[in-house]
Amino acid sequence: MSRRKKRAFANINNSVFPINVIATMSSGKSTLINALLDKKLMPSKNEACTATITEILDNDMETFTAVVHDVDDVVLQKIPELTYEVMSELNDDENAHRISATGNIPFLDAKNTALMLVDTPGPNNSQNQAHKNTTYRAINSDANNLILYVLNGTQLSTNDDALLLSYVAEQIKKGGK
C-alpha cells in the first residue's frame, strides 16, 4: 500500500479530517484561520508571509502547543506554548518545514471529530519557488483531505488564481477529493 493511501486510511480511522486552506499569496488564508480559531495565532501581512506548512489539530485545549519539523520530518523543537510571536519567528526560520500544532478550534468538539486546519504558503511568490512546491505537495498530500480555497475579493479573476484553481480541479478529478 502506498504511503499516501496508508496516511489517508489512518486519517479515516482516527477521524482526523485535514482541511488545506489554499489560495494565492496575500489572499487571507492566515487571517481566515485566525478568525476560525478566534485567536491571533497565524502571522498575516499584505505580502508573502506564510513560508511553512502549519497544521492545527483540534484537541479542545486552550493552550496551543507545537512540534517543528525540518524537510526530512526530523523534529527540530517542541513548543509548549505557541503564540503569535513564536509563530512569526518560526515562519522566518528557513529550517522549519512543517509545524504541527494542537489547540482549540472553538466551534468543534474534538471528542467527536478532530479537524486539522492546514495553512499553506501562496504558490505565486515569484521570489520563492519553494512556496509553490510546498503548496502543491499539500494539495496532493492525502486522498481524503478537503480543500478550502480562499479568494481575495479585491482581486478576483487573476491569472494566478486561474492557474491554481485549475491545478486544484485537476487534482480533485484525479484523487477523488
Image: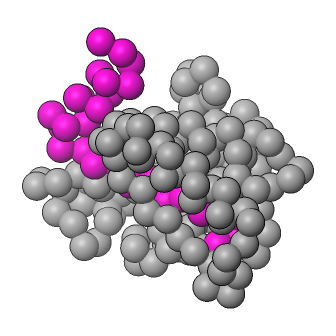
Where does the magenta region start and end? 1-27
Residue 81 on the magenta segment: no
Q: 38 or 122, which is in the foreground?
A: 122
Q: Is residue 138 above or below residue 108?
A: above
Is residue 38 visible to us here?
yes
Q: Is residue 70 above or below residue 31?
A: above
Q: Is residue 70 above or below residue 108?
A: above
Q: 91 or 116, which is in the foreground?
A: 116
- Residue appearing at x 63%, y 29% in the figure: 70
* Left or right of 161 on screen, residue 36: left
- Residue appearing at x 70%, y 45% in the figure: 132
Q: Residue furthest right?
A: 127
Q: Residue furthest bottom?
A: 154
Residue 2 on the magenta segment: yes
The percent position of residue 106, horizontal first and vertical second, equals 28, 72
The percent position of residue 21, horizontal first and vertical second, equals 49, 59
Residue 73, image quadrant: top right
- Residue appearing at x 38%, y 38% in the figure: 175
Is residue 90 visible to us here?
no
